[in-house]
Amino acid sequence: MKVATAEFLLSAHHCKQFLRDGIPEVAFAGRSNVGKSSLMNRLLNRKGLARTGSTPGRTQAVNYFLINGNLYFVDLPGYGFAKAPRTERRRWAELMNDYFGRPEAPQTLLLQLVDGKVGATRLDVEALAYFQSLGLEPLIVATKIDKLPRTRRPRSLTSIRERLGCAGGEMIVPFSAVTGEGVQQLWGGISDFLERRRRPAASKSLNQVGMK
Ligand code: GTP
Ligand code: MG
């Protein structure tokens, strides 16, 4: 997909600020510092659009970006930032519950990012169980894959798959914000999602004949 325009819209610190205008949303979730903002910037080919940094907890609100006037990218604050004060962590949990508990949430495409080198941690496993309990089936992305030599990648991806309990056919997209690996594959997933939203009847009939 060609990104003609990408602009920051707003930082929501409270559920009242969440956007509810029917525009499709792609949300990025993952541990603090896993590379959510970097991945978004790389997908959009806009270096400083979402703020990135080596200090975990850089993104603390639900940040909305408008892409081509007809799609939102939603950069979520990372989970598991242990050094954050307790009140802040509680505020984060409430914000996430509000975001994922919205009636529109099941229509969101959720990308769950897992560090390709570190692997899936206990927090990643718990977060996935939480998303699944809400009826969401996130697309899993293994980030910072450039940090792993190619020979070690298959073993790391298999281990992430096992930890997360992914069934054989489910896709894990290896990604690097440094080299751009995985960009096309993720845009493919986003385009499929948008197509399914545009033509729900068509995807339903595919489901019915067992083709999907
Ligand atoms: P929070 O907003 O704190 O939750 O972090 P985040 O998940 O948005 O991570 P962010 O994109 O800010 O990246 C964290 C650090 O990892 C930064 O220092 C990035 O430069 C680095 N980083 C992100 N993606 C990659 C990648 O693909 N490869 C490498 N080598 N480093 C990366
Ligand atoms: Mg961030």
Image (cartoon, rainbow, N blue to C red):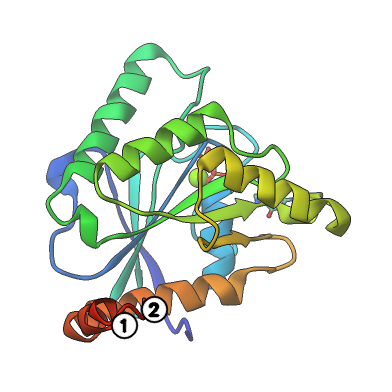
Q: Is residue 10 above or below residue 69?
A: above
Asked whether disc 1 touches disc 2, contact meaning CB atoms under 8 Å apart, the reply is yes
Q: Residue at x 12, y 52 (%)?
A: 103
Name the quadrant of the C terminus: bottom left
Q: Is residue 105 visible?
A: yes
Where residue 125 appears, x then y in whole percent?
Answer: 48, 34
Q: Which residue is mark 2?
A: 192
**Relative depth, front residue between 169 and 63:** 169
Q: Quadrant of residue 151?
A: bottom right
Q: Which residue is mark 1?
A: 195
Categorize mark 1 by other alpha carbons within 10 Å: few (<14), some (14-19), many (20+).
few
Q: Residue at x 51, y 19 (%)?
A: 82
Marks 1 and 2 sit apart, C-alpha to C-alpha, by 5 Å
Residue type at mark 2?
Answer: Asp
Q: Is residue 13 above or below residue 161?
A: above
**Relative depth, front residue between 155 and 23:** 155
> Circle 2 — which element?
helix
Where residue 93 appears, x then y in whole percent?
Answer: 30, 28
Q: Is residue 159 above or below residue 41?
A: above
Where residue 64 appears, x then y in whole percent?
Answer: 32, 57
Q: Residue at x 62, y 52 (%)?
A: 142
